[in-house]
Image (cartoon, helix red, strand yellow):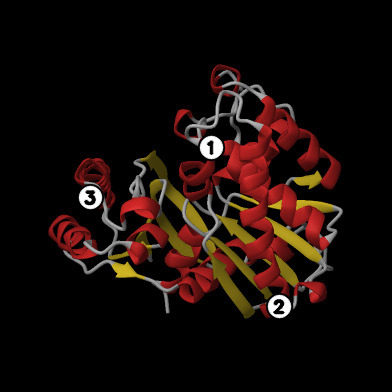
Amino acid sequence: MRVAAIDCGTNSVRLLIADVRDDLIHDVERRMEIVRLGQGVDRTGRLAPDALERTFKAMRAYRELIDRHGAVATRVVATSATRDAANRQRFVDGVREIFGVEPEVVTGADEAELSFTGATKGLLRLSPETEVPQGPLPPYLVVDIGGGSTEFVVGSEHAEAALSVDIGCVRLTERHLRDAGDPPSVAALEAVVADIEAALDRVEEEVPVERAHTLVGLAGSVTTVAGMALGLSAYDPARIHHSRISAQQVHDVTRRLVTMTHGERAAVPVMHPGRVDVIGAGALILDRIVRRFAFSQVVVSEHDILDGIAWSLTR
């Protein structure tokens, strides 16, 4: 079954066209555009007109790919920025016009379930040539660091507990780092950390993190940190997917990122141009999670909510 999944987040809009067969997803197209839909939402509570137009432009290109490849089912999921926006109907109307389907502005809990499914469905198949799976041990703590929010999900085969908190790389950058110097001041970084720690207090109260054996990290902030830790000369999803990055590597890369200038971050070989200004906040979120919950490493997944959306279309 050929399906099309679209994930519209605070920072990027992404497309997966895939064939789902034999309990596996086979990519046909996997695309990502940084559109910064959440530009200013934390401050204004509204989606900016230019941000909407950037998003719709990327989506029109995705519609052409969907038609060309003949996907038989399409699902569009929107997350943190559109949940928070007073004028989200403008977004809904635009998406319906482009794709002919109603976009689903999902709750944080739904987002967490989709991310968990996408990230963990393949973890027990890391050594298919052996009779005994050699993948990371469940239960998992899946952490999806987005632009506006971060999802925390604990589970083994299915999500068993989840929480979405309003810390994300775009939200924290706009709140504390946008005018904080280059590199940002110590005071600004401390303000970011204070927001993260307050959110992690909620996570600790509401999600049984102590049950998890394996930390699984998703999304662009995590994969960028992984690419830097691995010393890659270019972004390589195959090398990054299911890599294991030690806690010390996370701390070292984060320290580098928050002390770099904008130009130095832009020169990092694995850095997407659209992440240059927000990667410091994203790395700090991952760093504080590893520290707070004392994980020795993070298993990095290139599969995430997009894959979860694709799986949902086969039910």
Q: Kindly report the distance in space between the C-alpha atoms of the residues bearing marks 2 and 3.
A: 42 Å
Q: Quadrant of residue 120?
A: bottom right
Numbered circle sitting on residue 177: 1
Q: What is the secondary structure assignment of the residue under circle 1?
A: helix
Against 136, residue 270 (above or below) is above
Which residue in the structure is indicated by mark 3?
63
Q: Position of residue 252 (x, y in %)?
A: 79, 34
The answer to whether residue 100 is left or right of residue 303 is: left
Say whether residue 225 is visible. yes
Quadrant that contains the C terminus: bottom left
The residue at the far bottom in this view is 160
Q: Quadrant of residue 274?
A: top left
Q: Can you tell which of label 1 and label 2 is closer to the viewer?
A: 1
Against 264, residue 313 (above or below) is below
Quadrant that contains the N terminus: bottom left
Q: Position of residue 268 (x, y in %)?
A: 61, 22
**Residue at horizontal 81 percent and vertical 54 percent from the top:** 291
Q: Amino acid at mark 3?
A: Arg
Q: Amino acid at mark 1?
A: Leu
Q: Position of residue 92 (x, y in %)?
A: 21, 63
The answer to whether residue 157 is left or right of residue 72 is: right
The first of marks 1 and 3 along the sequence is: 3
Which residue is nearer to you in this view: 6 or 208?
Answer: 208
Against 293, residue 208 (above or below) is below
Which residue in the structure is indicated by mark 2?
205
Label 3 packing within 10 angstroms: few (<14), some (14-19), many (20+): some
Q: Kindly report the distance in space between the C-alpha atoms of the residues bearing marks 1 and 2.
A: 28 Å
Q: What is the secondary structure assignment of the residue under circle 2?
A: helix
